[in-house]
Image (tube, rainbow, N blue to C red):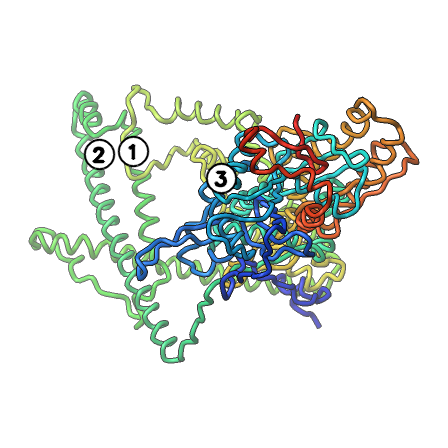
Amino acid sequence: MTVAVDFHTAAAAEDELPPQRVYEMRDYYQPTEPEPFHNDWQKGVPIAIDLGRSMVRVGLAGKEDPSSIFPSISARYKDRKLRRSLNMVGNDVFLDTSVKSSLKTPFDGPMITNWDSIETLLDYSFLHVGVDSQNRVDSPVVMTEVIAPPFQQRFNLMQLLFETYGVPKLAFGIDSLFSFYQNGGRSGLVVSAGHNATNIIPVVRGDPLISLAKRIDWGGQQGADYLGAFLPLKYPYFPSKINNFQIENMVHDFCYVSTDYQEELKHYLDLDNLEKKDVVLEAPFTEVVKTEKTEEELRLEEAKKKETIRKLQEQARERRLQKLIEKENDFEYFNALQEKMKSMTKKQVVETLREAGFDDQNDLNKYVSGLEKSLKKARNQDVGENDDDDGKPPSWTLLDVPDDQLDEEQLKEKRKQRLMKSNYEARQRARQEKEQAKKEAEEATQRDTEWRESDLSSWTSSRRSKLEALKKKRKQRLRLKEELTDRKSRASQMRMKNIASLANDDSRGSSGKKRRAGNVTIDNDPNDTFGANDDDWAIYRDIAQESDNEIEDEEERKIYEIEEELLRYDPKFTINDSLQRQFNWRNSTLHRFLRGPRDSDPDEQHQQHQIHLNIERIRIPEVIFQPSIAGVDQCGLSELCEQTVLRRLPAEPGFSGDDSKEVLKDIFLTGGQALFKGFDERMRIEFQSFLPVGTELKVRTAEDPLLDAWRGMSKWAVTDDARASFIGKREYEEMGPDYIKENRMGCIRL
């Protein structure tokens, strides 16, 4: 007993996998109520403000956590009912979708460019902390700043805080050093992977060496922008718009640092590995529910479809008949011309041929012969259509009537009936030939069945040989087709020679004039054997640059038929030996990259709104170690650390070998990118790659890379070191904005 094998279901015999988890694309946080106000402010208690490029954290010093955390964005909202404009800040921007479109940030990269927005953020911060004084903030302020800011940045902040808010004291510091202080650091290398840049700062015995600090212009924002530019290239026809908040959440939630990027990249798209690491995210959309049609609707639709097909067939038949009449007229005209030329002189014949557009008598004969063949082909066009369902041949009443007894309209009708009769007779002959071919095919199938049943091994051997020949021929043709795309290849050069040769020999006649453009150009020369071999026609396909889709389809159809027979009857032939297996989605790297390790249905609505994150999960964080991936012309983080630890630090005056050991004992990671899984392990591997064997090394991550900077500010602001570092308002007025008091939190004069 034999069992038919379906190519499309053969792969389903593999082990079934559990349903793939689909994550919803997280969008911006939409609060249900405005940011709460706090009433625990006390006069003289320092206020710590972590003015980050992505988030603002503000609260009273001495507390464990900030009282308010909100995005550093603002928007202007015009309330038409109240007839006034309102400034919305932080999460309050997302309370109304109409406000969200006008949000803006006061930063351009790491620098402040919109001071009006900064003032709005500070107003919002002081109000929510609970400052109740009308005209001034009667509390010292500790604020973060970038490393070595330009004078204008610090000047504007000091002017704004002292003159607009009237704060009594002010101090600045670097967020990563506050985080290092919060985690008990004394000597170490602080690596701050922040929102807009990645910085490294050596710290020796509590003093930061800002002169040795280095920066890489790559941070969390650049990583999100990189992914945002990458996804439209991967999914150019994605039906939904993916906003910046969704992209940032993809980076935060699913990206991780690879401990061996190159090795992992080689095997990332392997099916087994991809099954574990591919992440599917689905964009929100409104699903269109397709209603099932009733049987009556389906019946009417089918009837309408058949009627449309019938009308199209009728129109096509009329057009073919019209063309047939035109060709018949041409055939009669040129036949009459040939008869007329028999009684002409040689000079008259030459003039007549020249007027008709022919080079000589042979050219005319060739054209008439080709036209006759074209007529025969056109008459056989409608073979198989049931225009004689009653079995009786149609009658043509005017064919037996002499022409001199008919008027002009009857002559036209007689000519039409003559064509219809020829067409009918051609269809009858073709139908008989078709029945004969069908009978011969049945006999061949019967003989093949008897051969298979009597000698299966010989039959399978013959089928395998035929299959190999077809595959070899197909492979050679595809290789030639690929070579033709390269204009420098030998196949392409030969093709151009053929074009040039045919253009010189065939496009012009012996007289040098362009040949008449007729309806057909069939060569009736019996001595011309070009075209007898099917390979000859490849020249015309090359010149026309037409696709080989029909040939490919025919080859694949023959190959699939033989493979299906072998799968049915040959136990040694499996699905893995078939051509269909070569086109299986499991073997497509592009499919795995775009659609993951499972089969996909392009018409399924949910899959249309899904994206797959695989290689991007390690590619985005890897840029910090290899900036060239994203086109950033800077060295990577590990190379920068190597230069600092092994070259620049030992050359620093007063730096000893013991200090070098202490620094390596505390490689401190902070900032948003430190939250990437595997970041600390990768840093440990990178340091071990360039340090001497046996060097004591410790890499650690801040307890909370996001909040420890503010907590360090809160802790430091109430110490004696902080009190000695504050700049009073009177000192500012007396000495100007370029006067600062250095501290161990990075506020130093370079």
State the CA–CA distance, disc 3 to disc 1. 104 Å
Q: Give the mark nearer the N terminus: 2 vs 1.
A: 2
Q: Amino acid at mark 3?
A: Glu
| In the displayed structure image, the side of residue 443 where residue 368 appears, left or right | left
Question: From the viewer's perspective, is residue 571 above or below residue 614?
Answer: below
Q: Position of residue 522 (x, y in %)?
A: 36, 37
Question: From the viewer's perspective, is residue 529 above or below residue 698?
Answer: above
Instruction: Find numbered disc 2 in the image and state the secondary structure of the residue it sits on.
Output: helix
User: Could you say which is closer to the camera, residue 47 or residue 547?
Assistant: 47
| In the displayed structure image, the side of residue 102 where residue 268 appears, left or right | right
User: Could you say which is closer to the camera, residue 157 or residue 620?
Assistant: 157
Q: Position of residue 626 (x, y in %)?
A: 68, 35
Q: Position of residue 441 (x, y in %)?
A: 54, 61
Q: Residue at x 75, y 62 (%)?
A: 571
| Marking on residue 163 | 3
Residue behind mark 2: 338
Does residue 475 appear in this view? no
Question: From the viewer's perspective, is residue 692 above or below residue 248?
Answer: above
Residue behind mark 1: 365
Q: Amino acid at mark 2?
A: Gln
User: Could you say which is closer to the camera, residue 277 or residue 190?
Assistant: 190
Q: Quadrant of the N terminus?
A: bottom right
Q: Are marks 2 and 1 in contact (CB under 8 Å)?
A: yes
Instruction: Find numbered disc 3 in the image and state the secondary structure of the residue it sits on.
Output: helix
Q: Amino acid at mark 1?
A: Asn
Does residue 186 appear in this view? yes
